[in-house]
Amino acid sequence: MPDIFKNHGIQTHGILSLSPRETCELVKQGAYLIDLRDTDFSDYKAFDVVNVISLPIGVFDEHADKLDPENYYILADSSGLKSRLFAEKLREKGFGHVSSMSGGFVEWERDGMPVRVDVNERLSGSCACQLKPRERGRSEK
């Protein structure tokens, strides 16, 4: 496979940083998008492209070794703050084709990239974190 990361993104501290649009294009070319978000968030709103691997930060270290180090991986989190750190972890494990998506899911959605929404998995709550029980199954009072 040719280097599909070539001529894309910006190198930041040794890790390629990609925009959501570039990420979407590269996933269509065979790269894997690793979703680092907790399933409480990814079950509600998900990246709606092929080749998405859900690997939440909390279980990343114990499952990262199951990935094929020859594949191309783009790591994404909620806001783009931690994906570079986890891309560095893969690089340290010998993965050669690793990048990070800048802006995370927030920018992905804002840029109009494909999103799958399951309203039954929506979290409720008045703060931005919305860490309250899911709305489904709650009785109305």
Image (cartoon, helix red, strand yellow):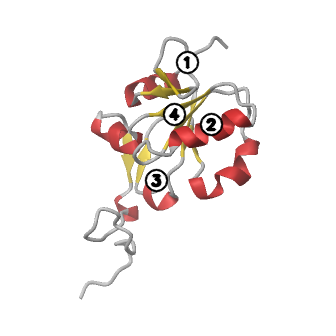
Task: Name the residue type under label 3.
Answer: Ser
**Image quarter (top left, top right, bottom left or bottom right) of the C terminus:** bottom left
- The circle on residue 5 is 1
- Label 3 sits on residue: 42
- The circle on residue 128 is none
Mark 1 or 2, which is nearer the eye?
Answer: 2
Q: Where is residue 93 in the image (x, y as percent from the top left)?
A: 74, 37
Depicted 124 relative to depicted 68: above or below: below
**Callout 1: few (<14), some (14-19), or many (20+) C-alpha neighbours within 10 Å?**
some
Residue drawn at x 69%, y 25% is 96
- The circle on residue 100 is 4
Nearest the viewer among 92 and 134 is: 92
Mark 3 or 1, which is nearer the eye?
Answer: 1
Report, in whole angstroms, how far the alpha carbon at label 1 lies from the one at label 2: 16 Å
Task: Name the residue type under label 2.
Answer: Glu
Task: Name the residue type under label 1.
Answer: Phe
Q: What element carries label 4?
A: strand
